Image (cartoon, helix red, strand yellow):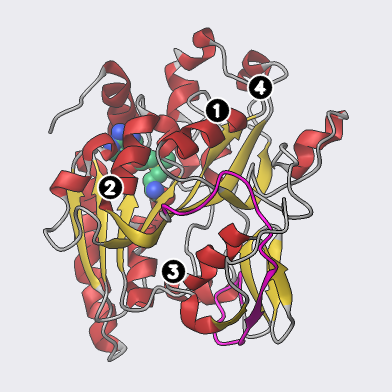
Amino acid sequence: MATSTATTQSVQDYYGKVLQNSDSLATNACTTAGRPPPIIRELIKNVSPEVISKYYGCGICIPDCLEGRKVVDLGSGSGRDVFIISQLVGGKGKVVGVDMTKEQLEVAREGVKFHEDKATEMKLSFGNVDFVEGYIEKFNDILPDDMKDGQTDVVVSNCVINLSPDKEAVLRDAYKCLKEGGELYFSDVYSDRRVPDELRKDETLWGECISGALYWNDFLGLAKKCGFSDPRLVEDSRISINNAALERKCGNIKFYSATYRLFKLPELESDCEDYGQAVIYKGTVPFLGGSSEHAFKLDAHHVIEKGKVFPVCGNTWRMLKETRFQEHFDYIGNFNEHYGIFDGCGKNVPFESVNDNGKGGGASGGGGCC
Ligand SMILES: C[S@@+](CC[C@H](N)C(=O)[O-])C[C@H]1O[C@@H](n2cnc3c(N)ncnc32)[C@H](O)[C@@H]1O
């Protein structure tokens, strides 16, 4: 494995040796996700208790329409999300977890047998599952041959990229392995300002997924630099830390757990432009918790009701028409005529609660549109 640094070594020790299970975390940063929706809770029942006990995720990073898809989970840990997603991709799909920590990989690999027995018991065909050891800064090369270099449909990650000393390399490799129309859909920790160096050097705060957090506006710039032109915020919540000593160290910095979706669509524009287009949702996406037969949730600002003519900017149009969501919509319009900037764009502060301190700005699609 290439790319070992003092930071990755310390994180490996933290997840391999210091933490025994989610109860041994010093803060609640890794466990802020709300209760999963009922359908996901049913799928979790087919995952081994040992895998669940070593789950350290901070969000729900399970997007819609995964059947038959090839999915990579970055920093898969003990594998909870891999085992959930494998039930959604089904027998024709595939899920690969990538992690650098041997102890976590061992738990994940032991979970495979439990999972296969469940599939047999339920007479269902779950997707192929594999776990590979390696760094998320250079994972494209260690993927199976049919998933590297533009062949992966979806990359997910749950509370991991903040731990990386080289977040740009992670985003670049995600872009590289994805198909056009594919997406990086991930939950992570962000801050409302840049985290000072002395906190970034604190191994506990870093290991707990706090001080490695990117300031949200730096994240948006980085995502765009790596080719993901219009990042969309799906959901967010404030992290309370819940540890008086560590909270004191962090002072006034606010931290958020947030799920973003970043599409690999080279023709996306830097801003949301109006071409007079609209979409109509057919109500055909299976219910998972976000979307349903009544409404499709693209992001926090696009919940598209079934049957309604829903005006969209050019970027949103492409996120639906040029991705795996294509068949679930009817499309009105084209790119022939431009009507200016799409009404509703331009707000920059992504997280609802960042505005609590009167900074203004309002919630937006995370630097994208609307
Ligand atoms: C907070 S845990 C989350 C694990 C898993 N996603 C979950 O939800 O339970 C972080 C995981 O990311 C892995 N990790 C952190 N940095 C990594 C890196 N640079 N390369 C590979 N794995 C990494 C750790 O080994 C650990 O298993």
Q: Nearer the viewer, residue 342 or 81?
A: 342
What is the residue that sits farthest to the front in this orientation? 337
Q: Would residue 286 be seen by someone viewing this image from the given angle?
A: no
- The secondary structure type at the circle numbered 4 is helix
Q: Is residue 327 above or below residue 99?
A: below
Q: Would residue 295 be seen by someone viewing this image from the given angle?
A: yes
Q: Is residue 289 above or below residue 210?
A: below
Nearer to us: label 4 or label 3: 3
Q: Earlier in the sequence, mark 3 or mark 1?
A: 1
What is the residue that sits farthest to the right in this orientation? 358
Tag of residue 218: 1
Tag of residue 247: 4
Residue 164 covered by magenta stretch? no
User: In the picture, residue 48 is in which quadrant?
Assistant: bottom left
The part of the chain drawn in magenta is 266-291
Q: Is residue 77 above or below residue 7?
A: below
Residue 310 position in % (x across, y down): 72, 74
Whether the residue under disc 1 has CB within 8 Å of ligand 1:
no
Indicate left or right for 53 with 60 as reference.
left
Q: Nearer the viewer, residue 366 or 27?
A: 366
Q: Which residue corresponds to mark 3?
A: 323
Amino acid type of the residue tagged 3 in the rendering: Thr
Q: Nearer the viewer, residue 97 or 291?
A: 291
Nearer to us: label 3 or label 1: 3
Give the residue drawn at x 41%, y 37%. Answer: 161
Tag of residue 176: 2
Residue 238 position in % (x across, y down): 69, 40
